[in-house]
Amino acid sequence: MALIAGDHPYLRLSLPENAPFALKPSPGKGWGCFATRYIRRGSIILHEQAWFIFGKSLHELSESDMQECYNHLNGEQKRQFSHLGRNARTLYASKLDALRDNLLPLIPGLDTFGTMNVMRCGLLPISSRFNHSCLPNACIASVQRGIQAVKSIQEGDEINLCYGNSFEVKTTEERARELPFVCICEACNPERNFHYLSDMRRRLLQGIYYLTRGCNINVMHDTQENAVIEDITLKTRSENSEHSSVFLGICYHIRALLLEAEGLATPGLIKTYFYAAMYVTMRKFVRTSRSGPRPSRIEILQARNWMIKALEVMRYVPAPDLEESLDFEALEQQLWSDD
């Protein structure tokens, strides 16, 4: 059954009072969420309590899991759930199909029954109305904090999330293999000049990932056919973690510039700034055979700039795991020390 905009079931979904967005038709995407006023980066756009949380990943769910979830919903939730469509022009064929398409991956935590799980996904009917973009302006901070703006969003702009993992180091073709639809964002649209620059940048980011981590993030086994790094010596040194602090510092410096040019404000950008600064600091305080020469005054100033940028991005990009795993306070003290 075709659905027209004026009588679309999404118009009967209950949005939070004073929500900074409205549901509207989105060209080529069905329906989406559009800002009804200016949204400053770092602002919480939507805080939605999950109706049901599974202690499994999306791919592990069975039909019985879906049925258990639906049975758990109360009368009002089932009424709201009946308004969901396939984010296009037709209704779902069954409630189980609708459930499957309206689940979102969640960070580790408790499921509906109070059991701690590393892999989780939850039913969030409003949050799942936000469309995908490989250049998102918002992200899911956590179940507690909700959806947060990672860029300033103008009134009338569509609010987008990124559905994929590690998309900043995947080309258009690689991302397309993971998405169940054709993405038409600026990074994927071949009619846009940005698309070609984006693919080059993300391919370079793949190479830098290999140089710094010693593996190809996109495949289990790096073969000659899919090799990101073709030089055998360079590849071996990367896999054995044999690069100098100078080399690694340059890699993270370039990675930061590429992510900035791509317009990706992510936890990965924070981590890149941190490591770009850290490898300069290591040459200042930790003297080893692979440290390289002591950093110049200009390098120290650049490292301080990376650190300032990392702390700035952390104000509007949620990265609780990085705050716990990276010692920002110690690195700050070392960077501003005169020793």
Image (tube, helix red, strand yellow):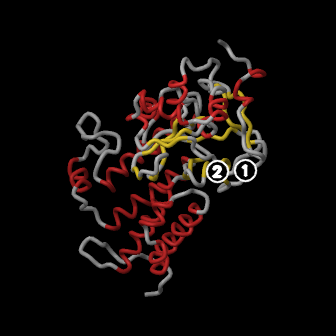
Is residue 262 placed above or below 240 in the rendered structure? above
Which secondary structure lies at badge 1?
Answer: loop
Quadrant that contains the N terminus: top right
Question: Where residue 316 sits: x, y (%)?
Answer: 61, 58
Residue 299, percent from left and from top: 46, 72
Which quadrant holds the C terminus?
Answer: bottom left
Q: Which mark is residue 133?
A: none
The residue under the point 35% across, 40% down is 218
Residue closest to the eye, 317 or 20: 20
Query: Which residue is labeled 1 in the image?
Result: 39
Pointer 1 or 2: first along the chain: 1
Residue name at image x 72 percent, y 40 percent: 15
Q: Is residue 22 above or below residue 338?
A: above
Given residues 101 and 240, the one toward you in this image is: 101
Q: Position of residue 50 (x, y in %)?
A: 57, 44
Q: Callout 1, which amino acid?
A: Ile
**Residue furthest bottom in the image:** 339
Looking at the image, residue 332 lies above or below residue 263? below
Q: Residue at x 32, y 53 (%)?
A: 211
User: Which residue in the protein does label 2 denote?
Assistant: 149
Rate crowding at label 1 as few (under 14), some (14 to 19) or many (20 or more) other CA atoms within 10 Å: many
Decide: marks 1, 2 in contact (CB < 8 A)? yes
